[in-house]
Amino acid sequence: MTGISLLNWLLPLLYLAVLVDYGAAFFLRGKPDARKPWLAIVVVVHLLFLVLRAIHEGYPPLVSGYEVLSLVAFATAAVYWIVEAASHDRRTGVFVLLLVFLFQYTSSA
């Protein structure tokens, strides 16, 4: 199994883990400003996946619908990460990351 296919398999699981963490913060009414590095780590791993895939394939990941879904998932997660860093409130992340997980799961399947 190559690194690209491993990351393709691992990304939906990582987004699911982050989604569960944000769901716990929302439903259990934890501290909304308690910052955790998990989203940043997953966004960096996703960026690494996109770069490695672009190098391996020889073109940016914009050719098929599944590649575009992965890019949309990455962009949405990255923008939410920046918004959360500015607002210091992570309670709404469960809604955004649910879409990100669904996009990446569809792309990886």
Image: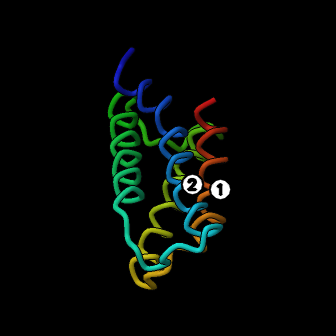
User: Circle 2 sits on which residue?
Assistant: 19
| Residue kind at label 1, given as amino acid type | Leu
Q: Nearer the viewer, mark 1 or mark 2?
A: 2
Q: Residue 79 placed where, x, y %?
A: 48, 69
Q: Residue 74 placed where, x, y %?
A: 49, 54
Residue at 33% from the left image edge and 35% from the top image edge: 52
Occupied quadrant, residue 24:
bottom right
> Which comes before the other along the chain, label 1 or label 2?
2
Q: Give whichever of 57, 103 is nearer the camera.
A: 103
Q: Residue 26 placed where, x, y %?
A: 61, 69
> Helix, strand or loop at disc 1?
helix
Quarter containing the N terminus: top left
Quarter containing the C terminus: top right
User: Circle 1 sits on which residue?
Assistant: 98
Q: Give whichever of 92, 103 is nearer the camera.
A: 92
Occupied quadrant, residue 95:
bottom right
What residue occupies the far top of the structure in this picture? 1
Residue at 61% from the left image edge and 68% from the top image edge: 28
Neighbours of disc 1 within 10 Å: few (<14), some (14-19), many (20+): some
Q: Is residue 90 left or right of residue 23?
A: left
Mark 1 to mark 2 CA distance (whole Å):
6 Å
Residue at 43% from the left image edge and 82% from the top image edge: 88
* Colouring style: rainbow
Residue 2 vertical placement versus 83 (above, below) = above
Residue at 52% from the left image edge and 38% from the top image edge: 13
| Residue kind at label 2, given as amino acid type | Leu
Task: State if disc 2 and disc 1 touch (CB < 8 Å).
Answer: yes
Q: Give whichever of 35, 3 is nearer the camera.
A: 35
Q: Is residue 65 left or right of residue 67?
A: right
